[in-house]
Amino acid sequence: FSVIATAPQKRLAIKTFVQRFSKGIIREAVIREFKRGGQVYFLHNEVETIENVRESLEELVPEARIVIGHGQLPERELERVMRDFTTQRANLLLCTTIIETGIDNPHANTIVINRADKFGLAQLHQLRGRVGRGAQASSCVLLYQPPLSAMARARLEVLRETNDGFRIAEKDLELRGPGEVLGTRQTGAVEFRVADLVRDAALLPIVHAVGERLRAHHADAARRIVARWVGGSARYAGA
């Protein structure tokens, strides 16, 4: 396999701000982008209240030409919305996480994510990647509502500090633990007794290859090793 360890050439770093929810912060971020001729993503992930958010944004930023995109729209309507945004007929796309992948608009240089404290690290990093695709500097504003849990605070701090996807993945693993990341925390699987998935990442392919050879050629020994280190929880991890 191959690892792409660098960002695309000439891709500018995205400046990330972590802010307590404030109408003043929203207006400042949006107007700043409009003044230089750019466009804005405003992410609000609750379809039930998205029209209310549109009304609030229209009052707060009368300069905004807003279109709304979410997964409950008919396909043709959603296509029209995205076309209006990419052709700059609209300058603000109020949307849900449908923009997480497959959107490449070099004119959209600011993304505001409402209730960013409710998202995971990987998803926030993916959403932030919608901007920074043009020649201008880009920004990501992560809005939160207090009180913040320790986990949410740590996630937002990581996003503020780095744009490095590898570092973010490592921190995500560190914060959540391998059981949650691998989907085994609720299955009865125990945590690793010796290995650290972050520290020992480079060794894992080697360990995997050795384990496969051991299982293929020394099945009895492999079963005894599993019984010694994992015990009965192995039955549940594969359920």
Image: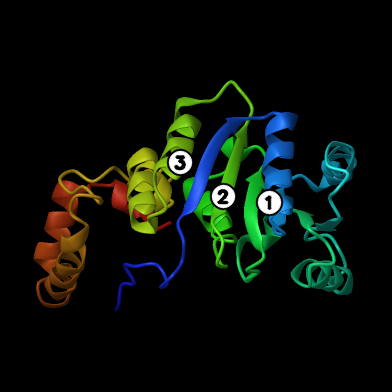
Q: CA distance from mark 2 to mark 1?
A: 9 Å
Q: Nearer the viewer, residue 11 or 82?
A: 11
User: Dot 3 corresponds to which residue?
Assistant: 160
Q: Nearer the viewer, residue 200 or 115?
A: 115
For the point 9% across and 72% down, the residue is 218
Give the side of residue 200 with respect to residue 159, left or right: left
For the point 86% across and 55% down, the residue is 65
Circle nearer the viewer, 3 or 1:
1
User: Dot 2 corresponds to which residue?
Assistant: 139
Q: CA distance from mark 3 to mark 1?
A: 19 Å
Q: Amino acid at mark 3?
A: Arg
- Tag 2, which secondary structure? strand
- The answer to whether the residues at label 2 and label 1 have Cβ atoms under 8 Å apart is yes
Circle on res. 33: 1
Visible in this render: residue 96?
no
Give the side of residue 31 with respect to residue 135, left or right: right
